[in-house]
Structures are given as structure tokens and as C-alpha cells.
Image: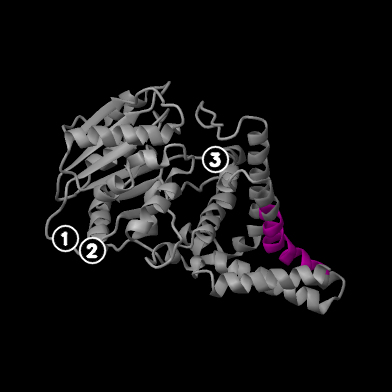
Amino acid sequence: MFTLLALLACAAWIYLAFRHGRFWRGDQRLDALPNAPAEWPPVAIVIPARNEADVIGRAVASHMAQDYPGVFHVFVVDDRSTDQTAAAARDAGDDARLTIMTAPPLPEGWAGKVAAMAAGVAEAERAMPDAHYVLFTDADIEHPADNLRRLVSKAETGRLDLTSLMVKLEARTFWERLLIPAFVFFFQKLYPFPLVNDPSHRMAGAAGGCMLVRRAALERIGGMSAIKGEIIDDCALARAIKPGGPIWLGLSTDTRSLRPYGGLGGVWRMVARSAFNQLRYSTALLAGCVLGMLILYVVPPLAALDGLFDNHALLALLGAAAWATMALCYKPTLDLYGRPAWEALLLPVAAVLYVLMTVDSARAHWAGRGGAWKGRTYA
């Protein structure tokens, strides 16, 4: 039986390596100097922020320092923070291009972040009726000075309705180094970037930290109300937009998150907040996810070691082949984070922890505490 599981794992990794959009290569990157458009369209930058006083200052300052040749304006939407988020944002940029507003009361049926995004879009429509694009970005994201210029160039050159970057996340502590590159790897596996970027493929995904959306595309889908109740708002927005126009998702090395996760608990809360939502609150999908993750990530090392110690050559070969393929697929993501290649052998450990986080997400949902984030809990 164990040999059959090892064979299944080996076959699955061969499929993932060669047939699943080559997701692991991590080669979807924003060009350093894309073609410049003839005219630089106006851009509204919308930053929903709730209790972000410790990071929003640097984020806003990075926007004020953009070298974008066209007109842009930053709209910070303070989502009823209980700290000094608005004051920290205001201190970061005494600039006519910065508007700080308070989000209206949360409408029934809306997720908090999406409602704040919608409020920012509404204010942008009033203040910048000629804006061609809306850049949605989180309050903990620091952008290099040329980022807006590169994003708009990419969107204009490719006539893209959505251009998104998976920003580089903090990975300094032991737990961050173990879990954050794995998180990015799993995200690429779930939403293979080359398939997302293929207009003929139905796969759609985005990363909420940095999403440049063509305003006409946003109007076409009916605005933010199209995804009003979505906790995983970025991928929901991508699914709504892609049927009407091409989208693009890539990795970044210089657009960075400022948020430290600290220890295991910080990463755990981030994942458990939305993992069961990703599975559409389905117990059957949860069971399939757990089983699939165990076969993919746990069986290979166990089979390799068991076959080695029990002198079972076939079992050891299958396990080692699957484990080696897994490690080789993981290496480009480790390279992105400047981690040594040998850490690819620890991916099964990270996978087990993510399985436990997903199960905990389901447990919290069943207990009526699903989707808890920054003082809000969604049904």
C-alpha cells in the first residue's frame, strides 16, 4: 500500500513539474524598463487601512516618492482604526496628492476591506473623474520609486485590465524563513502564474498587496459590489475581470511587505483567516486537501527513509524521486528569498504546518469565529 502511495506521489510531482503551467519556475516578473506609453494616464491609488499605524507611514511615503510622469493621487481609507493610522499616514506626506478619509459604517453583507476599497474608489471618482487606472495596494506595502511607472507601462503595453504583483514578504525569523517561501510556492501552485497570464485559459488570480485595475474594467463588472462579501478579495476580483479582458500576475523582488509576522502565530493567523474560505467551506474539499497534501509532501520523505532502512529499493527510489522533484521545484522560490537550496528538503515540514492551519481555519468556522481579522469576524 505504501509503495502505491509513493508511486502516486511520484507521478503527481512529475505532472506538477511538467504539466501544471510550469508554475514553479517563478519567471513571471515585471520588466525593469517596459515600453513607455505615448501618454501617461492618471492613476488613483487606493489604500484601505485598519490599525496600520506602525507601517503605513513608510508605505505612504513610498507612494509620494514615485517618479511617475503622469498624474496620480493617493487615497488612504482609514477603516475605523483604533490606533493612530490616519495620523501616521498624514505625517508621512504633507502633499496635495494625498487624501485621508474615514470609511463609512460597514454595510451589511460586505467584507471590511472590500468596503474600504469601494469607499476609496467612490472618492477617487469624485476627485479624479479622468483616472484611467486604480491601484489597490495594502497599507504595509513599500513600493520602489519606479513601481507605478512599470505597472502602468506593463498594463498599457499588454492592454491589461488587471496587473498584479505578489510582493516580497518578510522572512527574517526562523518561522518566517520556514513558512513564507512555502506560502509563496503554494500560492503559485494554486494559481499558476503562466496560466493566469494566458488570456485563453480560465485560471484567474491576483495578489491583493498590489493590483493595478483599469477603471473601465472595474466599471464593466459593476464596481466593488461585484465582490462585496469576499474575504479573498484579490482572486475574486481577478475572476470577475478576466472573462472580459486579459490579466497578469507576477513576482516582485523590490516591492515589499513591511509587516513582520514574528513567530509561528503570526503566519498561522494569516492563513487560518481565509484557508477554509478558499475551500468554499466544504468539508469534502477539506478532507481532499488534507489527503492530497499528505500524499504530495509527507509520503515522499517517509517512503524514501522507510525504503532505505527496510532495504526496499523500489519504495526508496520512488520516495527519493518524488522528494527530489519537490525540492527542485521549490528551489526557484527559495532563490527569490535568498535561502539556501538545502532548505527545500524542509518543505514537507512547512506543508504539515499549513495543513494544520487549514484544519484550524475550518474549526474556527464551525465554532462561529471564521474569517476573524483585526477585530472583525465574518459569518
Give the residue drawn at x 54%, y 73%. 19
Left or right, residue 174 beside residue 250: right
* Badge 1 vs badge 2, beta-carbon distance below 8 Å: yes
Sequence-wise first label, 3 or 2: 2
Magenta-colored span = 289-306
Secondary structure under tag 2 reads helix
Q: How is the image coloured?
A: one colour
* One can see residue 209 in this view: yes
Name above or below for residue 378 compared with residue 207. above
Give the residue drawn at x 67%, y 49%. 286
Q: Where residue 49 appears, x then y in whole percent?
A: 38, 32
User: What residue would you read off at disc 3?
Assistant: 270
Sequence-wise first label, 1 or 2: 1
325 or 339: nearer the viewer: 325
Q: Quadrant of residue 288?
A: bottom right
The answer to if 293 sits in the magenta stretch is: yes
User: Is the N terminus in the top left, top right, bottom left or bottom right quadrant?
Assistant: bottom right
Q: Where residue 116 appears, x then y in whole percent?
A: 36, 32
User: Is the C terminus in the top left, top right, bottom left or bottom right quadrant?
Assistant: top right
Give the residue drawn at x 18%, y 32%. 95
Q: Where residue 16 appears, x then y in whole percent?
A: 58, 69
Secondary structure under tag 1 reads loop
User: What residue would you read off at disc 1?
Assistant: 37
Marks 3, 2: nearer the viewer: 2
110 or 152: nearer the viewer: 110
Q: Which mark is residue 4?
A: none
Most extreme residue toward the bottom is 313
Most extreme residue toward the right is 310
Q: Residues within 10 Å of mark 2 (few under 14, many from 20)?
A: few
67 or 378: nearer the viewer: 378
User: What residue would you read off at disc 2?
Assistant: 157
